[in-house]
Image (cartoon, grey):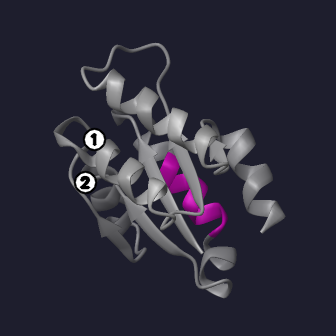
């Protein structure tokens, strides 16, 4: 199983805390993590193995969306900051739309992400 992880700047520490909470499941199930650049760097610093793509604003969201459309992503965990503006908003909406088109589970907050992880 491959899970894409993305977190806006203010949510990156929350993403690392979330991954630490589910570290045992991620390792036991041999889950592969793919992340946008900075989220991936923070994840690596926390001791996780992760494939890093470009930073979100530089095309990382689009790279994940492309893999999702190719059937290479099984789940997306995207801790969004809905109270901030993001210059790459069209890429974000495209990614979310493709999750719906391809029936890919998408969590945009920790509560939903926990439910998805418990279902694994």
Q: Is residue 109 left or right of residue 41?
A: right
Q: Position of residue 64 (x, y in %)?
A: 38, 53
Q: Position of residue 38 (x, y in %)?
A: 26, 50
The N terminus lies in quadrant: bottom right
Q: Residues within 10 Å of mark 2 (few under 14, many from 20)?
A: many
Q: From the image, tell me which residue sits under label 2.
A: 37
Counting residues from the N terminus, which is met first, the one under dot 1 or under dot 2? 2
Vertically, is 102 above or below 89? below
Q: Is residue 61 left or right of residue 99?
A: left
Q: Is residue 73 left or right of residue 120?
A: left
The C terminus lies in quadrant: bottom right
Which residue does the image show at 60% across and 83% down from the upper left?
27
Q: Residues within 10 Å of mark 1 (few under 14, many from 20)?
A: many
Magenta region includes residue 19: yes
Q: Which residue is the extreme one toward the left? A: 58
CA separation in Å, label 1 and label 2 = 7 Å
Q: Which residues are magenta?
A: 15-22
Q: From the image, tell me which residue sits under label 1.
A: 56
Q: Position of residue 114 (x, y in %)?
A: 74, 51
Q: Is residue 49 left or right of residue 82?
A: left
Which residue does the image show at 33% across and 59% down from the upper left?
40
Query: What element does badge 2 sit on?
Result: helix
Q: Are marks 1 and 2 in contact (CB under 8 Å)?
A: yes
| Near-viewer residue (86 or 74) | 74
Q: Position of residue 73 (x, y in %)?
A: 51, 63
Query: What element does badge 1 sit on?
Result: helix
Vertically, is 25 above or below 79? below
Q: Quadrant of residue 58?
A: top left
Disc marking residue 27: none
Magenta region includes residue 5: no
Secondary structure mostly taken by the magenta-highlighted segment of the chain: helix
């Amino acid at each position: 199983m491959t899970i894409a992880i993305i977190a806006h700047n203010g949510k990156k520490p929350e993403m690392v805390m979330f991954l630490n909470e589910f570290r045992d499941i991620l390792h036991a199930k041999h889950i592969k993590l793919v992340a946008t650049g900075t989220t991936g760097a923070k994840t690596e610093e926390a001791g996780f193995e992760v494939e890093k793509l470009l930073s979100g604003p530089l095309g990382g969201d689009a790279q994940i969306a492309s893999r999702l459309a190719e059937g290479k992503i099984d789940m997306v965990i995207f801790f969004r900051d809905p109270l901030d503006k993001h210059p790459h908003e069209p890429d974000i909406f495209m990614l979310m739309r493709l999750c719906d088109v391809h029936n890919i589970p998408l969590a945009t907050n920790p509560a939903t992400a926990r439910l998805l992880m418990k279902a694994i």
